Amino acid sequence: MRGVAKTTSGVALLASVRASWELLTSGEKLHAGGLAAAGIVTSILGVVGVGGVLPVIEVLADPEAMESSGIAATLSGYLGQPSSKEFVILLGAAALALMALSLIGGFLLQVATRRFTLACQDRLASQLMTDCVEAPYKWFLNRNATVLARTVHYDVIMWSGFTVRP
């Protein structure tokens, strides 16, 4: 029974994503793809930043690791066999720079995603309002004004908040 519920909810989620994708313009779809690619790059930077700490820990735990095999020995060879103190400082600075770059990238991605979400929300709300204003009078006779207002104001915000911005 649980497998059926998961499959049904997965199908519903996929249908929701497809319907949301159709609400985006072609330019917004391209922008969303760029944000997704930027998210992947930011995630990779985060992993590399955390992984950059490993050689520092390796050298701090065993200063002789610079001469033996491993990541620290390879990096030491690339840097021209610096002293242990210089090597730890270089590795620490590099790890700190990678982590800072990852955090800055994540922040910029959040700002760009928020701006994109608000732009999509504004466009869709304006489009819905224009469609309502330009609709024939007969169409309004069978509609509830409260439901229309909620659709333009609340539902668009919910759509942009939960589907456009993860």
Image (cartoon, rainbow, N blue to C red):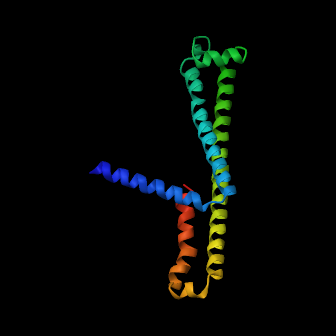
Residue at image x 62%, y 81%? Answer: 135
Q: Nearer the viewer, residue 157 or 54?
A: 157
Task: Between residue 33 and residue 96, name the one nearer to us.
Answer: 33
- Relative to 126, does residue 87 appear above or below in the rendering? above
Q: Position of residue 28 (x, y in %)?
A: 66, 57
Q: Residue 32, how many percent across, how many down?
A: 63, 52
Residue sitting farthest toward the right: 80
Q: Identify the image quadrant of the C terminus.
A: bottom right
Q: Is residue 15 visible?
A: yes
Which residue is located at x 61 percent, y 47 percent? 36
Image vertical order of residue 152 relative to residue 140, above or below: above
Name the foreground residue: 66 vs 77. 77
Between residue 88 and residue 23, name the one nearer to us: 23
So how many labels did they put on this image? 0
Q: Relative to residue 98, is residue 86 depicted above or below?
A: above
Locate residue 50, reporting x and y percent: 57, 34
Q: Quadrant of residue 23?
A: bottom right
Kindly tell me whether residue 82 is visible in this rendering.
no
- Residue situated furthest left in the rendering: 1
